[in-house]
Amino acid sequence: MSPLALARAASAAGLQMIALTDHNTAENAPAFAHACERFGICPVFGVEVTSSEEAHVLALFADPSTAVDFGRVVYESLPDIAFDPESYGDQVVVDDDEMVVAELSKYLIGASSLSMAELGAMIHRADGLFVPAHIDRASFSVWSQLGFLPPDRYDAVEIVGRSDRIAFDGFTAITSSDAHEPEQVAQRYVSFDAERPGFEELHAAIRAGRITLHGLTE
């Protein structure tokens, strides 16, 4: 699931925008920018953070350097649990040519010491979008961990299915494939009307609630 493989799969699926949201790091954001340029896709740069509540939170940014800086703060907040590549594969950083330039030593699936509220404040200071991830899932979601959506300035909430059990509290719902393999890209996606694909256009569509959801499970 390299940046280039992700961009290639997105192009084949006909997507015009796609976000890379690795767990608790954004070190591959620069290579992702290059891969998206190669395929004519508008990139969004993000991180899927595991908060101290063990709920997943999406942080989405317009440029790779902001995402990398945010990701490094998150990475430093992770516990010092060594990653075991023999059991879980590699945690690598690649360059524009897909050559491995670094390996991350901390276990990226652990929980950050940063709370959802702290993460939200950090994301907004960096002009990013703050989105509780897959809130209707039975694990690693705000509803599975806390049983409710804490009051905060969310820009949207992400869902994966059609359900009336989960309250969105007035926030715009978005969805994504949350792909961990290229074949999963575009299983779920959003569409919106704009003159061109772009981060500000996405943000404006979310603010106005002009988002159409595709591929939700029943």
Image (spheres, rainbow, N blue to C red):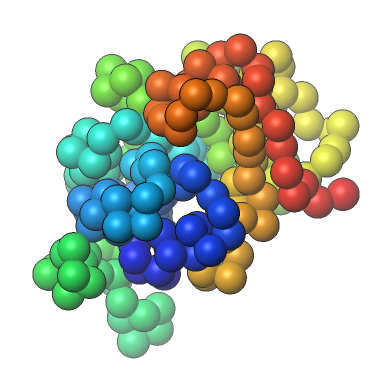
Q: In the current view of this chain or complex, which residue is farthest to the front?
A: 195
Residue 43 occupies which quadrant of the picture? top left
Q: Is residue 86 visible?
A: yes
Left or right: residue 55 compared with residue 2: right
Q: Report the number of numbered marks.
A: 0
Residue 210 % position (x, y): 65, 20
Q: Is residue 111 visible?
A: no
Q: Position of residue 206 (x, y in %)?
A: 57, 21
| Residue at the image point whose x is 51% and y is 69% from the top | 182
Residue drawn at (85%, 38%), measured in percent from left and top?
163
Indicate left or right for 60 with 64 as reference: right
Q: Taking 143 as reference, is 9 above or below it?
A: below
* Pick the front one: 191 or 61: 191
Determine the residue positioned at 63% across, 45% down.
189
Q: Quadrant of the N terminus?
A: bottom left
**Position above or below: 111 against 98:** above
Is residue 101 found left or right of 148 in the rendered image? left
Vertically, is 73 above or below 116? below
In this view, 94 is above or below 200: below
**Of the pair 13 and 204, the residue shown nearer to us:** 13
The residue at 22%/72% (across/down) is 98
The picture places residue 94, in percent across and down from the top left corner, at: 20, 67
Query: Given the current orientation, which residue lies at the most extreme bottom position?
Result: 86
Classify residue 109 as left or right of residue 193: left
Q: Residue furthest left?
A: 101
Instruction: Decide which of 156, 110 is in the foreground and name it.
Output: 156
Quarter of the rendering containing residue 183: bottom right
Residue 110 at x, y = what percent? Answer: 39, 56
